Image: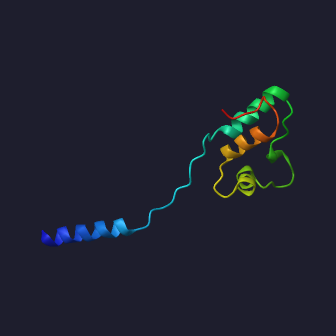
Amino acid sequence: MRLTSAALALAGLTLASLPAVAAADPPTNPNCLGVVTAQRAVAHHDLGDHASSQEEPRLGLGNVTRLILGEDAHIGDFGAFLGQIDGDDATYCP
């Protein structure tokens, strides 16, 4: 019994001393890119084709987001960013 208690105590101390895994902050609105894109489509009907219809491979939205806004940015953050900089009152992230 005493050996079991000592083993449990040692295991608890070992687990408590392990560094915590840092988690990325979640985006404020993870659906913001879809929201802003839909608003643009409804207001102006001028969105292009999907990247899969193009011949050359593309960088991808997640990669572009991290390139422009930083490594911890999410696609939703990119949508909010685009809604702010486009100068269009029809596009915003609530």
- Relative horizontal placement of residue 64, taking residue 18 as reference (left or right): right
Give the residue at the far top of this rendering: 43
The x, y position of residue 19, in whole percent, is: 44, 67
Quadrant containing the C terminus is top right
Give the number of callouts. 0
The x, y position of residue 64, in whole percent, is: 75, 53
For the residue pair 87 and 9, the one nearer the viewer reads as 87
In the image, residue 82 sits, relative to residue 55, either above or below, namely above
The x, y position of residue 10, in whole percent, is: 26, 71
The x, y position of residue 82, in whole percent, is: 76, 42
Image quadrant assignment for residue 37: top right
Quadrant containing the N terminus is bottom left
- Relative horizontal placement of residue 90, taking residue 21 as reference (left or right): right
In the image, residue 61 sits, relative to residue 30, either above or below, namely below
Residue at figure coordinates x 72%, y 55% from the top left: 63
- Relative horizontal placement of residue 74, taking residue 44 as reference (left or right): left
Residue at figure coordinates x 65%, y 49% from the top left: 74
